[in-house]
Structure formats: C-alpha cells, structure tokens
Image (tube, rainbow, N blue to C red):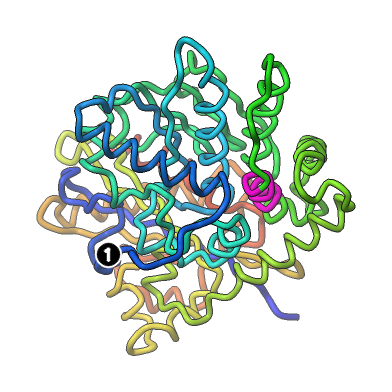
Amino acid sequence: MKAFYNLIPAFLAAGRVTAMPQNGVPQQAVLAASTKHTANPLGVGHFSEWSRATKKQFLVDWQNGKASEWTIVEGNEGGDLDSMTAALTWAYHLEHSSENTSHPIKAIALLQTPSHALDLRPENKVALDNSQMTPGHEDLLTMDELPEDPETLSRKLKGIVLVDHGSPLRKWSHAKIVSIFDHHKDRGTAPDAEPRVFETVASCTTLVARQMLDELEKLDQEYHMPHELLELVLSAIAIDSGGLSGKKTTQADIDVSKRILARSNWKKDDLEDVMEELDDELSKAQKDIDSLGLRDLLRRDWKGDFIDTPSPRTPTVSLGFASIPYSMDEQILKTDFAELFDWFAKHYRDGEKEKIREVVLTVRDDVRIDQDQADSLFNVVKEALENNDQGIDFQPWHRADELAPRQMVWTHKSHAGRKVIRPIVEAAVMGWE
C-alpha cells in the first residue's frame, strides 16, 4: 500500500526582527521577486473591476496621506484559496454594505504572500481564472506591493480584519484588530473585535460568507453580488470540504454553500454536482506541483513569525513552518546533489489510505545565538514534541542516525498537522530561558 506523506518542517533561528526579509522566509529560501506582467488582458466583470479599482485607490490614498481611512482584510501568509477568498469576500462586503451610509468603509484584501509566490499554488490560479480576474494577479494586492513596511503602515491604518488566522503577525501588531474570522483554535486575541467568529468548519470562507449573507439580507436594499465572487466562494468551500463530502465538512459548510449557490449562475444545478466538479478540478490543479523544486515547495506554504522568549540573552526567536506534500526521501531527490545534507543546506500534504506525516526540527546557530543556546533551544522543543499532550506518537525517521546536531525528523500516523504541531512548538519557545 502506498503511503502518503505530510511533512511539516519547523525551523528556528534567534535574532533581531530586522534580520529577516519582509515575507518572513529565511533568506536562503527566497528567490528574487519577479515583476508583474503589464501586457495582460484585463479581467472582465464587476468583481475584477472592483478589485483593480480598489487596489489603485488604496495606493493613491496612501500617497496622499490617507492610509488612516483604510481597513486591510488579510488572510494568513500561506495564501491558500480559502484565505485569499475569505479576504476578498469580506473586503467586498465591507465596502458595498456601507456605501450608502454616513460612514462608508474603505476596505482592501491583502494576500500576505509575495506576488512571485502566488503561482506556486496552481489551484488559486485556476479559481481566479474561472472568476475572470486579470491574469498575473494584477487585480490583487500582495505583500511585496505594499507601499511601505507593515510595521510602519499598521500604525496608520483604520484597522485590520483577520481571516483564516486567529492572531496577527508581529509586523501588524500596532494595528487595531477590527474583526476576526477563523476556523482554528481561539487564542484570545482581540476580545473586543466585532464580529469575532471562531468555529470549527471545513473552510473559513464558510464563516465569512455566512456573516456576509446574514448582513446582506438585513439591508434595506441589497448591493450587487457579482457571480464571479459567488463562484469563487463555492470553489474555496469545495476544495476544503472535499466537495462537501469530506471528513471535515460541517452542516454550516453545506448550508452556506446552498445559500451561495442560489444566488449564483449555477442556481439551477445540483449542489452536490457543482461542489464535486469544483473539488475535482481544483484538487487536480493543487497536485500539479511535481515540477517545483525544494525551495519553491517551501515558499508555496511558508508561515513564520517572531516569538518572544523569557531569555534575556535571546529575547526573540524566528519560528517558521512549511507544509510539503512529499516525503523527506522524495524531497531529498529534488536537491542539487540528491543527498540528505543538501536538504538541510538549503534550509529548508495528503491522501487517504495510510497517511504518514513527517516533522522536521532544526535550530541554527549564528552571530546572534551561540551553539550552547541553540543546543538548549533545540532540546526544549524536541522534548515538548516528544512528550506532547496531544497523543501524537512521534517515531524517529528511518535515517535519523544520519542527521547532524540540532536536526531531527520524526514520523507519526495521527491526523495532527501544522495547526496542532505549531502551538506545541510556540509554547515551548515562549517558555525557553
């Protein structure tokens, strides 16, 4: 029986915040940002036009010192279809639901990934093409297109809305958190945010779309809802819920999909057929990544931030996670020398049947953290993982004896992915002295 792998490398390095590039990926894994195409045909339809016009107005207002009039709706830095769709949906709703009021809201969706990494998720490209957006992602605002660094911009904004992640990255910590929508664990961030929705569903887009529809239906006059956006919403829910037939599917995912379908151009079609077809198309695209090298596999789903520790010598640790749908053995073959050492030298998902997940831990010493500190930090995190209270039975990888100091690889057969592993690691780092 073929085993399927879900690898979750965890990488730690201590140092100042300024030591990391803006997108949070270790410099060794960053390729030069490509410029966006300028000769692409413009997208057609209201949704593309709105998105492009909003992006232009945001940049014009920033230039004119009006950043304080804007709310940024941002998904997580992994930039998957769910995160992107949830952000676009809520930004569209905020603007259109308030446009005939005395306090209209200026809102824009931000993809917390650089533009050159967007095509590393082919399912996003398919969904955006289906929604008639401009090729090359010109309608979308990405991290590398922000007019200034988030630390500075966050102090000027009216606020931010978090979708598909429950707490902001450190670089957005100075911004007011207006609302939160997340389908993961509630960590208590921004208790006064409104709306503040934490609920276990397959797709965060379900939560955003439900809130949007509830508010839309209470308006004296409904605003125009473009079919392209509705179809994008169905796409995001479909791929996260396995066409509404996956194990993570909830009644909320089904109910919201019915409500969205009834407003879309597919309203005469059967819901199950629509969602199954979307899931098949998008899942096929999602798996079309065999041509990606190791660095691109890491870049396509990199999530990282800075964690405070009690240690006076190393008060801040850079912590990064990447989820890769290949086993360690398969990834090693993608390196230049097809050897284990080359995987670590470069620094750095799922099926049914028997699913084997792999977790990699490595701690790097450099000019800001000496070897003794790095050894201590590695041991603290290693012990926390091996003695976790989540019932995860970590077993050493079959080549663990070949690993260098402060490198470890485990396998486990539980369903625990990054969303379970990451809090364990973060708690260990925050308690390290």
Q: Residue at 57% of width from left, 34% of height from top?
A: 182
Q: Which residue is mark 1?
A: 33
Residue furthest left as drawn: 367
Q: Which residues are magenta?
A: 228-237
Q: Quadrant of residue 219?
A: top right
Tell me if 12 is positioned left or right of 9 in this view: left
Instruction: Classify 10 Å Cα crowding around label 1: few (below 14), some (14-19), many (20 and above).
Output: few
Q: Position of residue 421 (x, y in %)?
A: 51, 49
Q: Position of residue 81 (x, y in %)?
A: 57, 53
Tell me if 345 is positioned left or right of 394 in this view: left
Tell me if 298 is positioned left or right of 405 in this view: right
Given residues 318 and 226, the one toward you in this image is 226
User: Residue flagged by tag 1: what amino acid is it?
Assistant: Ala
Question: Which element type, helix, strand or loop, lies under badge 1?
Answer: loop
Residue furthest bottom as drawn: 337
> Can the viewer see residue 424?
no
- Looking at the rendering, in which quadrant would you find the N terminus? bottom right
Determine whether 304 is above or below 196 in the image: below
Determine whether 72 is above or below 366 in the image: above
Q: Quadrant of residue 54?
A: top left
Q: Position of residue 200 (x, y in %)?
A: 68, 36
Determine whether 194 is above or below 207 in the image: above
- Looking at the rendering, in which quadrant would you find the C terminus? top left
Q: Residue at 20% of width from left, 27% of height from top?
A: 65
